[in-house]
Amino acid sequence: MRQHHLITALLSCGLLLGSTASARQQASTVPAHEYFHIQLGGSEKQPESGRLLLFAQDANDAEAEASKRGQTSVDDVDTSPFFPTKTSVAAREVSRIVPGQTVDIDVDRTAFPAGWSSLPPGDYYVQAVLDVHHDYNYSGRDAGDLLSKVVKLHLPAASIPTLSLDRTLPAHDPWTLGRWATPAMRQALPAARAHAREIDFTSPSLTAFWGRPIHMRGRVLLPPNYDAHAKKTWPVVYYTQGFGGNNNRVIGTLVSVYAAMAKGQMPPMIWVFLDESSPTGTHEFADSVNNGPWGHALTTELIPHLEAHYRMDARASGRFLQGHSSGGWATLWLQTRYPKIFGGTWSTSPDPSDFHDFTGVDLYAPHANVYYRPDGTPYPLVRDHGKVLATFKQFAQLERVMGPYGGQMASFEWVFSPKGKGGRPEQMFNRDTGDVNPVVVDYWRDHYDIAYRLQHHWAQLKPYLNGKIHLYVGTADTFYLDGAAHKLKAVLDSLHAKSDIRFIPGRTHFDLYRIGKDRNGLLKEISWAMYAVARPHSKLKPVGMPAP
């Protein structure tokens, strides 16, 4: 029953405390709550649980977007951190729902950007999703999630609407390339698949930390001329993905790398595509009191295991790191934390490496707040060149509604923060106010601020790290990550360190690798720079592209 109907009924019966007048005054100040009935379709075979999410989008906007995509109908309603306020989202936890059972969701209790009772009256497309793996913040909709049909409704509705979760998303074959794939990728796919090996390694140290088997996953890509019985070895690139990546979502990059090696556009090397996704977001191969010793496990367990099974160059000068975004931070961290293991990192658009500029916010400032500047204006977080698409507050509060696990902000805390009560990490900032917790930030600084680490340990690190840091970021980075890169460069320059930090004019987070018409041109250049370190006397040159 809706709350305003309940208040009216109680007033008519004289059951509210206080005078009738005061009760009426209270009723007028209590906002009405809207509800939906969500049913688990009778065709489902077993009980389910998860995060129940309800999405609503203005009908005119949804139809216009569908038309731009060439669709004749609205097939799904979803949200996006790039346009967070276009879709209203409501959520609740469902501990158990059986086929045919109905649960109610109060779309005003846990909602973004506001309760649905505040939506302008009109037509909306609405869809329900049961996130059974609690990973919507990281992966979005994926295999096993339950969906309702998209329904067009007039809101506020005259009666409580009912949606049925009657479709289960099937598993997707990761080797099926999407429409974005180039003809060269499609042609190279069979050979790339034949040269790929899946990694499923149970880590002793991570297993001991968690008290249950923890698997390290990834894919090894062997070069076209690889010979398991040859005396020679091949240089190795350890590649990490950005936030939202996983073992299946790396296939496009894997195929592109193989196609480039087959054409001689990239040198013959072994590529290890590491999966750094976890239930908490990305563990970023950091040794963390919350996620466990992932860096230790990689360097002392997984890498020796791989080198025992493949013809890998096991010298530091033959091991390289490359990653983008959160993967860029991971590779930068691994290089600076384990400088004797790797021969260099080529990190692109890394997450903040100096917390004086955490996507534009100085976390060390007195009374720091991630939502508002000192003058009260909101901090932006997502941009398209000069246009702000989302603020820090919108991004964080949408994430909170989607669930307290796996989101980008929560992921940072699982990596960087001290352990808090109840086994969860301490929050770096208050989700309601944006106020920064300086005690938590001090912990972040002492353990994970890369610039701080370099500044205070350079004398010990210099012999093993000098000349090994390479960083590329666009001056129009979508998440303002060029700011922290500038501060890192200033620290390295003040230390008279040899480094290569480049700011590519006009490039964003998503087109950084493009050179001319080649959307992977930068990756090809990076691969040749690595190869020159591993094989300085090689006469091998790129085919079909300018020399690096």
Image: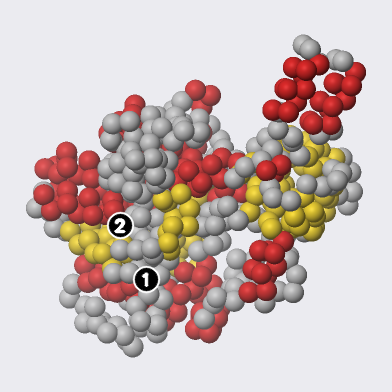
Q: Which mark is residue 41?
A: none
Callout 1 amino acid:
Tyr
Residue 409: where, in percent of width, then height?
A: 46, 43
Q: Secondary structure at mark 2?
A: helix
Q: Earlier in the sequence, mark 2 or mark 1?
A: 2
The colour mode here is secondary structure
**Mark 2 or 1: the one toward you:** 2
Q: Secondary structure at mark 1?
A: loop
Residue 544 visible in image: yes
Q: Which mark is residue 482?
A: 2
Seen in the image, is 125 located left or right of residue 292?
right
Residue 139 visible in image: no
Q: Quadrant of the C terminus?
A: bottom left
Residue 231: where, in percent of width, then height?
A: 32, 70
Reply above or below: 5 against 465. above
Reply above or below: 116 against 9. below
Seen in the image, is 490 located left or right of residue 89?
left
The residue wearing badge 1 is: 513
* Alpha carbons under labels 2 and 1: distance apart: 15 Å
